Amino acid sequence: MTMRCARCDGTGWVCETHISRPWEGPNACGCGAAGVPCGRCNNSDETPRMPEGFKTEVDKGGWRH
């Protein structure tokens, strides 16, 4: 049996405002804040593990703020 991270519920991402709550999944925080890599299981020393279904989209307009 594989253990799931208690902080992010195995998703690798937590709520930026409430870091003890998962950012996605059935137990997601839902407050609307951005997601950040989980400090326990999505190591910041490497490229973070992206959420399932994540797609990078680039257009001719460049970066948007």
Image (cartoon, grey):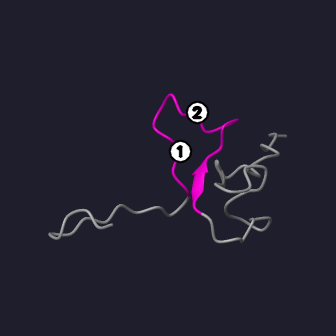
**Which residue in the protein does label 1 denote?**
49
Residue drawn where x is 85% and y is 40% of the image? 1
Q: In the rendered image of this protein, does residue 1 appear above or below residue 46?
A: below
The circle drawn on residue 43 is: 2
Residue drawn where x is 58% and y is 33% of the image? 43
* Count of residue discs: 2
The circle drawn on residue 2 is: none
55 on left or right of 58: right
Q: Position of residue 55 (x, y in %)?
A: 40, 63
Front residue of this view, candidates 30 and 52: 30
Q: Position of residue 5 (x, y in %)?
A: 78, 43
- Pointer 1 or 2: first along the chain: 2
Magenta segment = 34-51
Front residue of this view, candidates 49 and 40: 40
Mark 2 belongs to which amino acid? Asn
In magenta segment, residue 40: yes
Mark 1 belongs to which amino acid? Arg
Q: From the image, state whether disc 1 or disc 2 is nearer to you.
A: 2
Q: Residues within 10 Å of mark 1 (few under 14, many from 20)?
A: some
User: How far apart are labels 1 and 2 at the CA level?
Assistant: 8 Å
